């Protein structure tokens, strides 16, 4: 019998890639918004009850516009309702139903100021509203027994019709041919989505695994990612200008603007020890059909 996996928020970028990679091996039940609104706990309970014996539930539902969360107070409140309270609702309902839950979180829960890779045990200390709402959701989900999987800078190969991934955003920039400023001293962990979603499936299948897992790729700078994609696409790198996140943040703080995390390198040792491994950016890009971008 084919095992069932329930996705909440499966209409977004990660859900789209999850269904594309695992739709053949599993029956994917897609409880998408607005059919299921995680802010409404009793309707959530009703929607999940028929699937209480499934292999597990993956919570992908989130308010994800990080820039809007910084500048728009109404959206900030919405982020809190969905990413914090909504995540808690999902975790409580899953605990009540005794159904395994994987909650997806983000690298933005960390401040990005330390020089060594963040461990799953490091304290959360978000620097902006989106990260704060996700941190509250992550803490609540863990308290109710969920497993947390951390994702960062996701990309391809299944292109979403309205949600561009990290590579699609860069390719759009490169193709415009304008001057592009890119931090060459900031580190982030671009994540090939089939590796991440395979990690989610491994966490669902292996019920002994508990706690939090960073399932992200090896670090890159935004500058190196742009230069690599330009090379692969045979585009000039002359318009890609290396800039400094440290200098940018100094000016942004004086202006009261949004600042960026200097170093979001995450340790992946724990995930790799259970065979959840994400390939390098160069190897991931090799798997993409760049002609489709
Ligand atoms: N994309 C990234 O760069 C990134 C990086 C790190 C971690 N993550 C995490 O990965 C997870 C999946 O992200 P994603 O990129 O797939 O995001 P996405 O494309 O924005 O998809 C999120 C989904 O959640 C739905 N949703 C919003 N409010 C909801 C509610 N109240 N109840 C139920 N569903 C609701 C959205 O529906 P609508 O489209 O109708 O609003 C959308 O289908 C999230 O937890 C996110 O925080 C994402």
Image: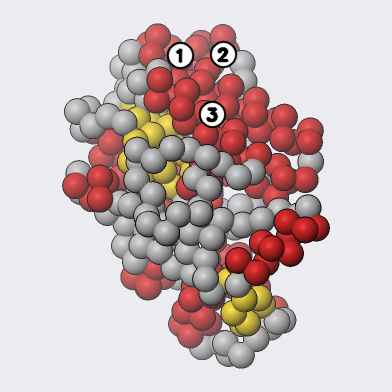
Residue 100: % across, % down? 33, 23
Q: In which quarter of the image is ligand 1?
A: top right
**Foreground pick, 130 / 126:** 126
Residue 28: % across, % down? 39, 34
The image's mark for residue 206 is none
Residue 20: % across, % down? 41, 49
Q: How far apart are marks 1 and 3 (CA)?
A: 17 Å
**Foreground pick, 204 / 228:** 228
Residue topped by disc 3: 136
Q: How far apart are marks 1 and 2 (CA)?
A: 8 Å
Q: Distance between the residues labelled 2 and 3?
A: 17 Å
Quarter holding the N terminus? top left
Residue topped by disc 1: 93
Quadrant housing residue 250 = bottom right
Question: Circles 1 and 2: CB distance less than 8 Å?
Answer: yes
Q: Is mark 3 on a helix, strand or loop?
A: helix
Up the image or down, 146 lies above or below 160; here it is above
Residue topped by disc 2: 41
Q: Earlier in the sequence, mark 1 or mark 3?
A: 1
């Amino acid at each position: 019998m084919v095992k069932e996996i329930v996705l909440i928020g499966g209409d977004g970028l990660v859900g789209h890639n999850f269904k594309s990679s695992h739709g053949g091996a599993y029956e994917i039940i897609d409880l998408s918004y607005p059919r299921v609104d995680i802010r409404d706990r009793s309707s959530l309970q009703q929607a999940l009850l028929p699937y209480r014996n499934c292999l597990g539930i993956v919570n992908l539902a989130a308010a994800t516009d990080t820039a809007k969360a910084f500048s728009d107070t109404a959206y900030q409140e919405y982020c809190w309702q969905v990413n914090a309270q909504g995540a808690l609702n999902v975790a409580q309902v899953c605990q009540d139903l005794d159904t395994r839950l994987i909650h997806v979180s983000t690298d933005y829960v960390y401040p990005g100021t330390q020089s060594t890779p963040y461990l799953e045990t490091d304290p959360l200390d978000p620097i902006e509203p989106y990260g704060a709402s996700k941190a509250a959701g992550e803490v609540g989900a863990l308290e109710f027994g969920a497993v947390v999987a951390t994702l960062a800078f996701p990309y391809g190969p299944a292109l979403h019709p309205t949600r561009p991934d990290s590579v699609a955003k860069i390719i759009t920039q490169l193709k415009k041919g304008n001057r592009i400023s890119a931090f060459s001293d900031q580190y982030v962990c671009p994540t090939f989505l089939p590796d991440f979603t395979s990690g989610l499936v491994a966490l669902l299948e292996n019920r002994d695994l508990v706690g939090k897992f960073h399932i992200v790729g090896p670090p890159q700078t935004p500058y190196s990612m742009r230069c690599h994609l330009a090379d692969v696409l045979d585009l000039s790198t002359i318009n890609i200008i290396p800039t400094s996140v440290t200098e940018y943040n100094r000016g942004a703080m004086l202006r009261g603007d949004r600042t960026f995390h200097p170093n979001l390198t995450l340790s992946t040792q724990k995930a790799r020890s259970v065979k959840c491994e994400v390939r390098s950016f160069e190897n991931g890009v090799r798997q993409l059909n760049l002609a489709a971008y």
